[in-house]
Image (cartoon, helix red, strand yellow):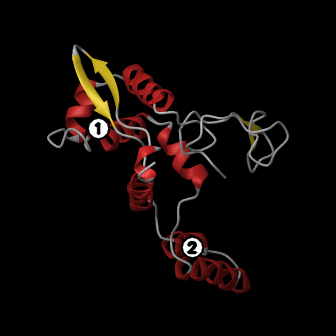
Amino acid sequence: MEGIYEIIPGSVPVEVDGTTWRLAPWTLADDAEIERRILAKRRRPLDVAREMIDGQPEHLQRHILALAYADECGGLRATRRDLLEWLETREGQLVEIWLRARKNHKELTLEDVERLFSAEAAASANARAAELSGESALGNSSSPAPPGSATDLSLGEQSSDGSSKPESAHPTSAS
């Protein structure tokens, strides 16, 4: 073996309306682009806190502002769950196709992808690309996790409200 590039899967062909598009494997740069898009839509913690404190007792106002300030200083972040939930939306599916396709089709714009892919075609193309490139819901390995292991998500994840959440089909899901 000459290098790590030999074990990384190549692009996967996906046909839509008679045209074959080559979707590249998902990368950390793609995760970063998705995180940037998520954070661009979020409101700043101090802005939210300012709205919450109206009419509250002074001690509660100070507490809310202190929490918001700590969040603001800690930097805004998107969790893995935030990324996966966003990728389940129509916008997320289209951006995922665009991010994968633009590596091989520089001329393709996000608007082109929106016109070409229906909601069903987008979900199908992303699933096919993940399947053919050997990606799975446990990361970049197509091997299943041993039952009961820390990465065994076969029973789904627990959401913050205690309800069971099904495992995502996105190739980069990891806690």
Tag 2: amino acid: Ala
Question: Which amino acid lies under the numbered mark 1 shown in the image of this protein?
Answer: Ala
Look at the numbered discs 2 and 1 and tell me whether their residues touch, using CB distance below 8 Å. Answer: no
> Tag 1 or tag 2, which sits nearer the N-term?
2
User: In the picture, residue 39 is in which quadrant?
Assistant: bottom left
Q: Does 13 appear above or below 137?
A: above
Q: How many marks?
A: 2
Q: Residue at 37% across / 21% down in the picture?
A: 121
Q: Residues within 10 Å of mark 2 (few under 14, many from 20)?
A: some
* Mark 1 residue crowding within 10 angstroms, few (<14) / some (14–19) / many (20+): many
Residue located 77% across and 47% down the image: 161
Q: Which residue is mark 1?
A: 101
User: Residue 107 in the image: x percent, y percent?
Assistant: 14, 40
**Left or right relative to 169: residue 95:** left
Q: Which mark is residue 49?
A: 2
Taking the image as shown, residue 68 lies to the left or right of residue 7, namely: right
Is label 2 in a helix, a strand or a loop?
helix
Q: Secondary structure at mark 1?
A: helix
In-front residue for pair 33/151: 151
Q: Position of residue 120 (x, y in %)?
A: 42, 20
In this view of the protein, which residue sits in the foreground, 102 or 93?
A: 102
Quarter location, residue 101: top left
The single residue placed furthest to the left in the displayed view is 107
Q: Is residue 68 left or right of residue 40?
A: right
| x, y percent for residue 15 | 29, 19
Q: Residue at the front extreme?
A: 1
Report the Cα–Cα distance between label 2 and label 1.
40 Å
Q: Residue at x 25, y 42 (%)?
A: 102
Q: Is 152 located above or below residue 46 in the figure? A: above
Of 4 and 145, nearer the camera is 4
